[in-house]
Image: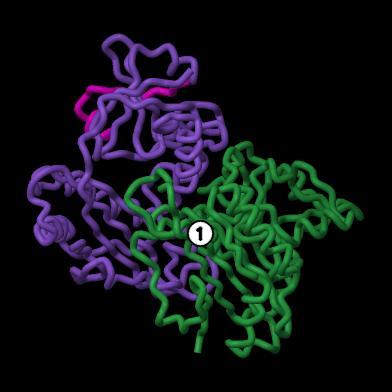
Chain colours: A green, B purple
Amino acid sequence: MDILFYNGSFLPAEKISIDPSDRGFLLGDGVFDTMLSVDGNPLHDHAHFTRLKTHADIMGIPAPTMDLPRIAADLLKRNGFIKGRHAIRTTLSRGPAPRGLAIPETVNPTLMMRAFPVPDPPATIQVAIARTVRRNEGSVLSRIKSLNYGDSVLAMREAKQSGADDAILLNNRGEVCCLTASNIMIMEGDTIITPPLSCGVLDGIERGLIISSGQARKDVITVERLKAADAVFCVNSIIGKVKVLIQS
Amino acid sequence: MDILFYNGSFLPAEKISIDPSDRGFLLGDGVFDTMLSVDGNPLHDHAHFTRLKTHADIMGIPAPTMDLPRIAADLLKRNGFIKGRHAIRTTLSRGPAPRGLAIPETVNPTLMMRAFPVPDPPATIQVAIARTVRRNEGSVLSRIKSLNYGDSVLAMREAKQSGADDAILLNNRGEVCCLTASNIMIMEGDTIITPPLSCGVLDGIERGLIISSGQARKDVITVERLKAADAVFCVNSIIGKVKVLIQS
């Protein structure tokens, strides 16, 4: 049975109903996080939940005060996910509200946490550069994990239609940003380069760990530089680091 | 009682539950429409539902084959909304799906229609130019009514914090796009100008009617041009045309 944590309770999926006036559903008004658990142990859970709270704060959504790492550990146990690889997705929306964009004075955010078995990552993936969608470097939403993933959905759809596994997204200046759900890193000799957040890049946990350990440095990556790189990788918390082959 | 149309049935709001794996809630993967009804008569309903289907098609979401104008009329009657002004919001998401951005081979879209009493529009509104968010002219989502309204939510929040009623959004090139949920038109003498869709502008029904009647022409509007205009208006299907005063 698929047990979720939903607004304070552990419940089977079929007992959970999102309110039809939830602003997460109607307006993309929320944030989320996805982290990896290996053999029942969530990795970097405190970093993930700190980021979730930071991103909620940026959108002005009251952050949950519950002990999220404990809830995540409990969720894994209740689902029997004590061996192997699992993704834990935490979704926080602003919750149900009257019609309109303006934020009501009192809100009642929706908090949902769910765990999923995930396969081992592939050794390499084939990617295409998205033609129909650019990342929005001019919005703070491009740097936080908000529920507004429509651009990534469309870029992934375009990639699959061209026979690729994923897409590389450029921003409106034509600079390289990321894949649809992972950060990008290029190798130039022994140096690892990844774009700065100001390019319209999600503040990924795995990306942050690689930068803060001194393994990568931040710099703008043009398409020419991307194509001339000695190697290209995508990184996120679920897949780790996977080699990327760019379709010509 | 608040009656909604939901996946083929008319139901009271409290009986409706959005599936926790609905891609509309998790990823902003859907489209919507809002139209005005006056005294029980939806205005331009065929244009609204044709656009909804066009926007669904752009996202690759199977469009509903039901008679949406008939459902809208029925919804108003069942709620007793036969006098006065009402908004009818139709939401179409790609529906529940397994984890991930890739679109599954078979989808089961969620269709929801709800009606709301709406007040008369104000005579004028005060607006501020958004500083923290730009429209994404590089994404087709900026031209369609998708569920990804996070940028507008943040721009509206910023506007309210500065004491304004709404925000004007610029694109990444610094050109004027729209307000958070309405199109913008400026007057220069007797001429009405509105930005082309390529600026990152929603293809609004009211905007389209004004252009196709020959009342307005499309041109890029810079901030300088906006501030020098003889008058500024916002237009959408619910408010019609409302005068805009720009905060200095």
Q: Quadrant of residue B11?
A: bottom left
Residue A123 seen from this side: yes
Q: Residue furthest top?
A: B189
Residue B211 seen from this side: no
SS at mark 1? helix
In the rendered view, does B43 fall on the left or right side of A17? left
Give the residue pinned by disc 1: A153
Foreground of the two, B130 or A129: B130
> Range of the magenta residues?
B206-222
Is residue B209 within the magenta segment?
yes
Residue occupying image coordinates x 36% and y 66%: A19
Foreground of the two, B75 or B217: B75
Is residue B38 within the magenta segment?
no
Residue occupying image coordinates x 72% and y 55%: A184
Q: How many marks?
A: 1
Q: Quadrant of the C terminus of chain A?
A: bottom right
Label 1 marks a residue whose chain is A
In the rendered view, does B117 fall on the left or right side of A104? left
Residue B136, above or below B59: above
Residue A187, above or below A76: above
In the rendered view, does B136 fall on the left or right side of B119? right
Foreground of the two, A145 or A103: A103
How dense is the environment of label 1, judged by Cα within 10 Å: few (below 14), some, or many (20 and up)?
A: many
Give, as a three-letter code, the residue at label 1. Val
Residue B177: x and y in percent read: 43, 31
Residue A210: x and y in percent read: 82, 59
Residue A56: x and y in percent read: 58, 54
Residue occupying image coordinates x 29% and y 70%: B16
Residue B180: x and y in percent read: 41, 38
